[in-house]
Each structure stands twice: as C-alpha cells, then as structure tokens.
Image: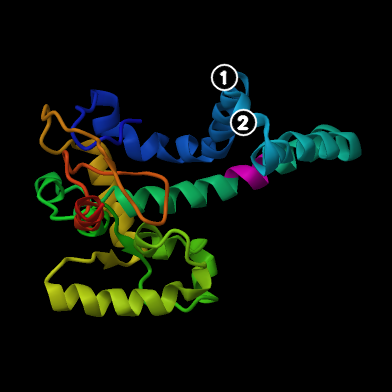
C-alpha cells in the first residue's frame, strides 16, 4: 500500500484500499519482524546488546506457545499479535497520513526543524490524561514525541498543553482531532496523492535529542543547528 504523498496510486488502491487496509495492518508487526531479521544478516551491529535480545521475543513466544498448546496456542498468539498490530498501525498511520500532514507545500516552506515536525504529524484524541491515553497506546502524543523524543512519556500531557499555547502564540498550526475524523482523512490520503510527480528531497533534519528525523523540507536545517555551526 502506497503512503507516500507524491507517489501515484494504482486503480486497486484508489477503489479498494478501505477493504484491504485491515489485512495489511494486521500483518504489520510480523512484517516488521521479518525486516528486523533481514538486518541481522546484513549488519553485524544488529547482533549486539538489547536490540538483538528484543528480536528474540517474538520467536521465543511462538515456540513456548506451540510447545505448551500446539497449533491452538499458535493461533491464539497470531490473533493477539495481529489485533495489537491492527490497532497500533491504524493509530500510527493516522498520525502522519491526514489532510493537515499532507499539505506538502506548507511542509516544504517550514522555517526550521521544529515547525517541520508540527506540520508532518497530527495527534488523535487530544487532551486525554496519561491513563486515558492507554487506549491510544500513547500515540495520541505523537507530535510531542517528534519534538522531544527523549522525554519520558508521562510528561506528555503537560507538554501538549504548553505546545498548544506556544503554537497559538507564534501562529504555527498544531493539528489534533478525534479518532474517527483522523481515520476518515487517512483513508482519503491513501486513495489520492498530493502534488503527484513532484520530486522531493527527503533530507535528514538534525535533532538535538534524536539521531535523525525525516521531513519533506528540502535542504533546510534547524536554525539552532546553524547557530551552533556559526559559533564553532
């Protein structure tokens, strides 16, 4: 399924993406595991530390269930992981695939890294408490995560309140809607490309808190990075 805002959609996706969307996200977790296995065989660094250990969890769980309960255990595990995958990827996709986040022209004109993150992400289920956000797997603070990825998520509700105030003060749009509206917008973006045929530079945007971020902003770094380099 194509989710790039500028790549054309085929006829199948244009007409039936709402039908095969569920099977695709159901298999998302398993597809991620397959990709992680590919990394194990292509990069020796992937065998080190906790990252390697976490990649053993899924096969170890399947092995344990199959030994204890046979094929019934395997089916139960597939259903459990599949339902979790469906909900997780549905939420994750709505964060970045909606009308506001797909305004490619605005994203290209972002003045710095912070504004680029605000334009590239939207939040679902706003103004939920930390406990209530469990139903969204805490993905309803995804924009906050983009801006402050190393901050513990228990602080996200308060940070979100501050973010709303700061965005209003500086006239920067921070998009947040209810789940069903976001889901409907996601389905429309899956069916129709934006600015089809436009070549975009998916440049790495420097972040003080994270290794790399990706944005539609071409050849623009944060003003903070430029200031640091000028000082050096």
Q: Position of residue 225 (x, y in %)?
A: 25, 53
Q: Is residue 107 magenta?
A: no
Q: Secondary structure at mark 1?
A: helix
Q: Secondary structure at mark 2?
A: helix
Query: In percent of the image, x 49 and y 36: which residue is there?
Result: 23
Question: In this picture, which residue range is highlighted in magenta?
Answer: 78-82
Q: Position of residue 223 (x, y in %)?
A: 19, 56
Q: Are marks 2 and 1 in contact (CB under 8 Å)?
A: yes
Q: Which mark is residue 189?
A: none
| Front residue of 93 and 146 | 146
| Front residue of 9 and 145 | 145
Quadrant of the rendering where the N terminus is positioned:
top left
Disc 1 crowd rating (10 Å Cα; few below 14, some 14-19, many 20+) is few
Query: In percent of the image, x 41 and y 60: which residue is there?
Result: 145
Distance CA(mark 2)–CA(mark 1): 8 Å
Quarter assignment of residue 63: top right
The residue singled out by tag 2 in the image is 46
Name the magenta segment's main secondary structure.
Answer: helix
Q: Which mark is residue 42?
A: 1
| Front residue of 166 and 77 | 166
Q: Of all residues shown, which one is farthest toward the top?
A: 42
Disc 2 crowd rating (10 Å Cα; few below 14, some 14-19, many 20+) is some
Q: Of all residues shown, which one is farthest toward the right?
A: 68
Query: In percent of the image, x 34 and y 40: which residue is there?
Result: 18
Number of numbered discs overlaid on the protein picture: 2
């Amino acid at each position: 399924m194509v989710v790039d805002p500028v790549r054309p959609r085929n006829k199948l996706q244009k007409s039936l993406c709402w039908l095969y969307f569920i099977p695709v996200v159901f298999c998302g977790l398993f597809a991620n595991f397959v990709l992680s296995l590919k990394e194990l065989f292509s990069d020796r660094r992937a065998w080190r530390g906790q990252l390697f250990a976490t990649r053993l969890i899924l096969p170890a769980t399947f092995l344990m269930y199959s030994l204890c309960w046979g094929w019934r255990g395997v089916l139960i595990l597939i259903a459990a992981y599949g339902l979790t995958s469906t909900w997780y990827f549905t939420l994750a996709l709505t964060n970045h695939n909606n009308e506001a986040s797909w305004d490619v022209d605005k994203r290209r004109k972002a003045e710095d890294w912070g504004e680029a993150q605000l334009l590239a992400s939207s939040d679902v289920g706003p103004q939920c408490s930390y406990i209530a956000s469990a139903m969204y797997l805490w993905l309803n603070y995804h924009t906050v995560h983009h801006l402050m990825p190393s901050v513990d998520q228990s602080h996200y509700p308060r940070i979100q309140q501050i973010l709303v105030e700061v965005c209003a003060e500086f006239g920067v749009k921070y998009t947040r809607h209810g789940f069903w509206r976001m889901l409907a917008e996601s389905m429309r973006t899956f069916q129709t490309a934006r600015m089809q045929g436009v070549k975009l530079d998916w440049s790495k945007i420097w972040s003080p808190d994270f290794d790399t971020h990706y944005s539609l902003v071409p050849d623009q770094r944060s003003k903070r990075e430029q200031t640091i380099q000028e000082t050096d």
